Image (cartoon, helix red, strand yellow):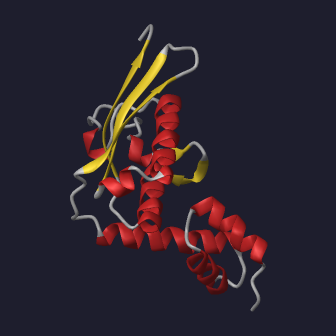
Amino acid sequence: MAIDITLIQKLREETGAGIADVKAALENSNGDEAKALEFLREKGAKAAAKRADRVTTEGIVYAYIHTNQTLGVLWSLGCETDFVARNDKFKELAHDIALHIAAMQPKYLKTEDVPADETEEKALLDQEFIKDDSMTVRQLLESKTGVIGEKIEITNFTIQKIGA
């Protein structure tokens, strides 16, 4: 089956996955874009699972101040090497997640951090990602781990806002 190069380019831009991976995903799904995306996500999740026990001793602290200067987010995105921490795609991911945190204002990072009396509160990692509601923040990190080839994790975050 011949795969349209424009579809390969489109999925590559959306996911950041390599051309060979995107082509394999499309071939595996008989050209179905949605199935190919799911295939790439699963591949990213498998890659993340393989790296789960690795330590993220490098990374960046990222600061975002909203345009009206009444809301700020300070948070840490960890990775395994300083090479990845300096990568533009990694910095772009940091910015996208900062925007998500500013918009959604989660109180907790992980589900296990949420107190029992706050059952409707969704932890950051379990929230639907604002730029792509077909995945959670956790799935976004897993997919980026598969693309970048290193464990990536959010280590902490804080939100400051005026009037809160």
Residue 38 to residue 120: above or below:
below
Q: Is residue 15 above or below residue 26?
A: above
Q: Is residue 145 left or right of residue 99?
A: left
Q: Position of residue 162 (x, y in %)?
A: 44, 10
Q: Quadrant of the C terminus?
A: top left
Number of marks drawn: 0
Q: Residue at x 45, y 43 (%)?
A: 94
Residue 84 is drawn in which quadrant?
bottom left
The x and y percentages for residue 6 are 78, 71
Q: Position of residue 99 (x, y in %)?
A: 52, 34
Q: Give me the residue at 40% from left, 47% from top.
A: 125
Nearest to the observer: residue 62 or residue 122: 62
The residue positioned farthest toward the top in the image shown: 163
- 23 in relation to 63, above or below: below
Q: Position of residue 152 (x, y in %)?
A: 35, 55
Pick the residue in front: 28 or 112: 28
Q: Quadrant of the N terminus?
A: bottom right
Left or right: residue 151 versus residue 73 is left
Q: Residue at x 77, y 89 (%)?
A: 2
Q: Residue furthest bottom?
A: 1
